């Protein structure tokens, strides 16, 4: 589906620094950065951790665990945010003197997501005394209860939206829990973990812990490479807080000051750290980590991030790169299956439903989220793709569009039809759920009905928001460099996009999937770079 091109309305940029290029000022203002403080890039611009509800209880647990050298087990998620959160938490606690700290990532094929009762029992078998969840736990009511029954304390760190009931954990740190005054509600799981470790370091300095233990005070800035990667990969909004975290992490990675595991992933991807952009974190590094959790066990990914041996890290990164190639092949086959289904449906029904529910018996449960994303991009409507995991369970991954808060929609369905959904969770734009296979058709009917009552046909058209037309003198390498430096760009703070009308001087195919065009503006002088523009585009409608 070709989106409608729509230019962003002019925004008031009068409060932004006057030395900024006028075009850059307008781009910032149109994305909600309307004051100088919104452009802060220094770590000093971060909000204090003290605003996080549950922080004092969490610090009490952690200080006690360190003092008594309790066995600490970090329970993470099997995606990139979960892997970076786990690596950060384990590494930082070790640096602060924890002698018995390890991690456990549930294998999605055996245990599913998060701190389930089965994972709690496994943690008990490993002798854990304190469980710390990262990037999960806010919905783990039964898992927390099981852990406590087995004698463990539980500290939840998460960023997902909570349900009506919270787990009875000893401490919960989540900016999205009810009553939390922390200003940034968009932290990724790794961001929450970083904030907790900042607060713990400050508390340990207060009580003279480091000098009494003969330890150096750790430099938490060394973990910002993990924070930047997890934040970008999880597609959380790049609000002021997250832009600072991503900017600082990128600066360290560009300077070569990142951990061996990330250097190894860059090497197998054929990328130079000094040229990294935020989009490279999402499209180069994150897929290689995510592929491990989708196809095998994210233990490999976390181990790579924790490794201090460059050679061993490279071996693990090469394995991860191979898994990513396998993931791409599976994804392409599943995508073609999905498109064939929709072509047949459109042929028979003349119009697609406003919400799409897809399922095929042989689909891979680790890849359905990617298929849902690709279909959503093509047809611009909410999509849920399901895979069978057992005779009694289908696992689905949902992707949504603006105007449909997909987790809230699932919550409404669960409230109105309590026996329909086995479990669910997620965000506004992405969610996961489980169903009994026998209830798929009922779910499809109720889901599409709920979508149809939530949005209009116009919202399915989709829009491509642009920042207007560049003048001839702005079509320059200098402007391109200014735009690059003005980042980081990402979710809810999108990279600048411009539209205009050009003459096509020539065009040719490059490889099988790209088109190389030589252009010049239809109006005005040639570009100031001294030659016609040369663009490489993916196949699609003729450029304007």
Image: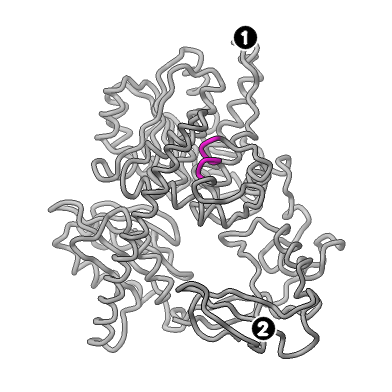
Q: Position of residue 29 (x, y in %)?
A: 72, 66
The one of 169 and 39 positioned closer to us in this rendering: 39
Q: Please state if 515 lies on the left or on the right of 431 as rendered.
A: right
* Residue 529 magenta-highlighted: no
Q: Give the extent of the magenta segment.
A: 260-265
Q: Which residue is mark 1?
A: 212
* Residue at 21% in and 65% down: 360
Q: Residues within 10 Å of mark 2 (few under 14, many from 20)?
A: many
Q: Position of residue 405 (x, y in %)?
A: 43, 64
* Residue at 13% in and 62% down: 438
**Quarter of the rendering containing residue 519:** bottom right
Q: Residues within 10 Å of mark 1 (few under 14, many from 20)?
A: few
Quarter of the image for the N terminus: give it.
bottom left
Count the numbered circles shown: 2
Q: Position of residue 308 (x, y in %)?
A: 52, 28
The one of 353 and 525 positioned closer to us in this rendering: 525
Magenta span dominant secondary structure = helix
Quarter of the image for the C terminus: give it.
bottom right
Q: In whole angstroms, how far apart are the C-alphas of marks 1 and 2?
A: 67 Å
* Residue at 48% in and 52% down: 234
Q: Dot 2: what SS?
A: strand
**Quick check: 64 above or below 142?**
above
- Residue 519 is labelled as 2
Can residue 163 be seen? no
- Are dots 1 and 2 in contact, CB under 8 Å? no
Q: Position of residue 57 (x, y in %)?
A: 50, 28
- Residue 149 is labelled as none
């Amino acid at each position: 589906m070709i989106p409608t091109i729509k230019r962003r309305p002019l925004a008031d940029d009068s409060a932004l620094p006057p030395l900024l290029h006028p075009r850059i000022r307008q781009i910032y203002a149109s994305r909600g950065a309307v004051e100088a403080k919104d452009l802060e890039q220094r770590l000093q611009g971060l909000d204090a951790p003290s605003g996080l509800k549950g922080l004092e209880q969490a610090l009490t647990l952690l200080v006690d665990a360190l003092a008594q050298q309790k066995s600490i087990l970090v329970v993470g998620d099997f995606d990139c945010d979960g892997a970076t959160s786990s690596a950060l938490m384990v590494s930082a606690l070790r640096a602060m003197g924890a002698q018995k700290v390890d991690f456990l990532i549930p294998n999605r094929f055996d245990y599913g997501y998060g701190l389930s009762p089965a994972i709690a029992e496994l943690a008990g078998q490993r002798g854990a005394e304190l469980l710390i969840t990262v990037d999960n736990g806010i919905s783990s009511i039964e898992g927390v209860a099981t852990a406590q029954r087995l004698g463990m304390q539980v500290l939840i760190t998460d960023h997902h939206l909570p349900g009506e009931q919270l787990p009875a954990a000893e401490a919960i740190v989540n900016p999205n829990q009810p009553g939390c005054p922390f200003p940034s509600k968009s932290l990724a799981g790794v961001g929450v973990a970083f904030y907790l470790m900042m607060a713990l370091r400050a508390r340990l300095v207060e009580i003279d812990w480091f000098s009494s233990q003969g330890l150096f005070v750790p430099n938490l800035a060394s973990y910002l490479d993990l924070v930047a990667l997890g934040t970008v990969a999880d597609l959380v909004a790049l609000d002021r807080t997250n832009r600072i975290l991503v900017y600082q992490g990128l600066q360290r990675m560009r300077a070569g000051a990142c951990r061996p595991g990330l250097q190894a992933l860059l090497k197998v991807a054929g990328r130079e750290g000094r040229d990294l952009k935020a989009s490279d974190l999402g499209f180069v590094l994150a897929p290689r980590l995510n592929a491990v959790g989708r196809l095998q066990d994210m233990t490999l990914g976390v181990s790579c991030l924790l490794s201090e041996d460059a050679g061993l890290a490279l071996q693990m990164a090469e394995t991860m790169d191979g898994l990513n190639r396998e993931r791409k092949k599976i994804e392409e086959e599943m995508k073609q299956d999905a498109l064939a289904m929709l072509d047949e449906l459109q042929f028979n029904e003349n119009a697609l439903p406003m919400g799409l529910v897809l399922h095929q018996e042989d689909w891979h449960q680790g890849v359905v989220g990617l298929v849902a994303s690709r279909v959503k991009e093509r047809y611009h409507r909410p999509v849920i793709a399901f895979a069978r995991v057992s005779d009694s369970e289908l696992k689905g991954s949902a992707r949504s569009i603006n105007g449909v808060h997909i987790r809230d929609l699932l919550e409404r369905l669960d409230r109105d039809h309590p026996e329909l959904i086995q479990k669910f969770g997620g965000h506004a734009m992405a969610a996961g759920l489980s169903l009994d296979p026998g209830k798929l058709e009922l779910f499809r009917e109720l889901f599409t009905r709920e979508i149809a009552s939530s949005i209009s046909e116009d919202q399915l058209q989709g829009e491509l928001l642009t920042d207007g037309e560049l003048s001839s003198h702005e079509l320059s390498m200098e402007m391109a460099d200014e735009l690059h430096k003005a980042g980081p760009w990402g979710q809810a703070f999108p990279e600048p996009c411009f539209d205009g009308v050009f003459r096509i001087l020539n065009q040719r195919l490059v490889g099988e999937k790209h088109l190389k065009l030589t252009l010049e503006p239809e109006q005005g002088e040639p570009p100031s770079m001294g030659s016609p523009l040369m663009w490489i585009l993916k196949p699609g409608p003729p450029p304007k």
